[in-house]
Image: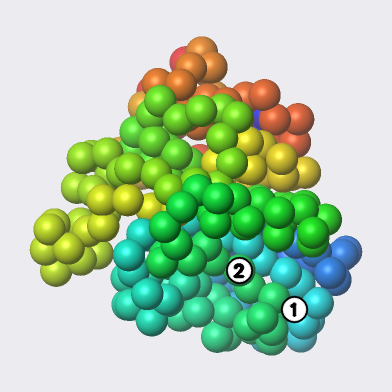
Amino acid sequence: MKIIKVTDNKEAGKVVSDLILKEVKSKSNIVLGLATGSSPITTYENIISKSKEENIDWSNVTTFNLDEYKGLESTHNQSYRYFMNDKLFNHINIKMENTFVPSGMINSNEEAQKYDELILKHGGIDLQLLGLGINGHVGFNEPGSDFEGLTSIVDLTKSTIEANSRFFDNEKDVPTKAISMGLKSIMNAKKIILIATGEAKALAVKNLIEGPISKDWPCSVLLNHSDITVVIDNEASKLLK
Ligand code: GLP
């Protein structure tokens, strides 16, 4: 595990966008795994501005997002599809048909796992970007998730619903389920970059970096990945030995 320490999320955005753009420039048909949440927003902002400045071509890039709220149509302003279009896809020359986000409208795990088949059909994910939940979730793989899990319909924990309620008018509006790539789907990526910033992430970061590998902290499975870079700021590093 490679660790990059930065001062804050703004700097994380610069560092991570540089890492991603380096990969995009060296492989024009790269398959990227992308994440939502507040952590990657500065990364996407930098990707947009540098892509404009340097005329970076996204027309052959394919992306797969980690997760989507169950029951939200792609047009819902809190859906992760909406977030990705708004925060990134609408501002670079990527082809919308090459961007994949799990559908929030599916009703079975059989349908959900077609997402893993689609990823495989595209040759697998070259570079997966991750955020980190306060309780150590990655994607929407909550504590107790199966390390061997593929894309499936998952229940959100009370703490995740509470944490994400800040984006909704009312906590009651936050979906209680999601469709998420599984920990195995994530671990299959050839390379991973995880961003964790802010004090609220400090305990999850400690478990991610120091272990032990345990289902109580889903992020800890990432210790087994052979090519992962973790970008953390001062506040998120507070509890590290
Ligand atoms: C959400 C997403 C995750 C994300 C995490 C952290 O629930 N499903 O993919 O990494 O929460 O979010 P944030 O970056 O806003 O702290």
| Label 2 sits on residue | 100
Query: Residue flagged by tag 2: what amino acid is it?
Result: Phe
Task: Report whether residue 118 is seen.
Answer: yes
Q: Secondary structure at mark 1?
A: loop
Identity of the residue drawn at 56% across and 35% down: 149
Mark 2 → mark 1, Cα distance in angstroms: 14 Å
Q: Quadrant location of the N terminus?
A: top right
Task: Mark 1: give few (<14), some (14-19) or many (20+) Cα within 10 Å.
Answer: some
The way the protein has been coloured in the rendering is rainbow
Image-quadrant location for residue 72: bottom left
User: Which sits in the foreground, 98 or 105?
Assistant: 105
Residue 39: x %, y % from top left: 44, 55
Query: Residue flagged by tag 1: what amino acid is it?
Result: Trp
| Label 1 sits on residue | 58
> Is ligand 1 closer than 8 angstroms to the Cβ of mark 1?
no
Q: Is residue 28 left or right of residue 42?
A: right
Q: Nearer the viewer, mark 2 or mark 1?
A: 2
| Whether label 2 touches label 1, CB < 8 Å | no
Q: Secondary structure at mark 2?
A: strand
